Image: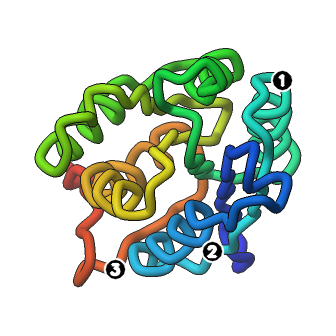
Amino acid sequence: MTDQPVPVGVVTISDRASRGIYEDKGGPAIIAEMTRFLSTPWRAVARVIEDEQAVIEATLKELADVEGCALIVTTGGTGPAPRDVTPEATLAVCDKMMPGFGELMRSESLKVVPTAILSRQTAGIRGNSLIINLPGKPSAIADCLNAVMPAVPYCIDLIGGPFIDTDPAVCKAFRPKAK
């Protein structure tokens, strides 16, 4: 056990934001939500990259394998447009896919907007890292994280990551009771 903050990868995938044409609002929205949710000390390892599958794959590998991020949260590139390749990059680098995350996020998003069915967000495991793909809109980031966050700490437990916990006043992390 270490007293160092848990590294959390925060990846904004946007051609325009990576070129400085567009202000990155997704990454800061993820950081704000993680600050609200997590009671365990953590630190953001943030990246803003273009929508290129090879770049996304390399970034996810670096955050998981080099930076040791227990959790990597991406924003952007989950729609049906030709350049939206975040789910493909995630699938390419993961050992296991976790389709329930995407199913729940789409279900929650459908309560807000009918076009949620166009989103292809997903999640997967690479080693001891949980990778979650979120949509690009800050309000959708909040909706999706609110839906899945209760399961995130236990998932990280199960894959051998560090113990992380949530602020129970914001989100009670689910962990089965010991027998």
Q: Secondary structure at mark 2?
A: strand
Q: Secondary structure at mark 1?
A: helix
> Whole-Å distance between the Cαs marked 1 and 3?
36 Å
Left or right position of 74 against 142:
right
Res 22 quadrant in image: bottom right
Residue pictured at 75% horizontal, 43% vertical: 15
Residue pictured at 35% horizontal, 55% vertical: 140
Residue pictured at 85% horizontal, 41% vertical: 62
Which three-letter amino acid code belongs to the residue tagged 3? Asp
> Whole-Å distance between the Cαs marked 3 and 2?
13 Å
Which three-letter amino acid code belongs to the residue tagged 2? Trp
Examine the rendered structure and indicate whether residue 45 appears above or below residue 28: above
**Quarter of the N terminus within the rendering:** bottom right
x, y percentage for residue 25?
58, 67
Residue holding disc 2: 42
Which residue occupies the foreground of this view, 155 or 29? 29
Which three-letter amino acid code belongs to the residue tagged 1? Ala
x, y percentage for residue 75?
56, 48
x, y percentage for residue 120?
42, 26
Examine the rendered structure and indicate whether residue 130 appears above or below residue 18: above
Residue holding disc 3: 167
Residue holding disc 1: 54
> Whole-Å distance between the Cαs marked 2 and 1?
28 Å
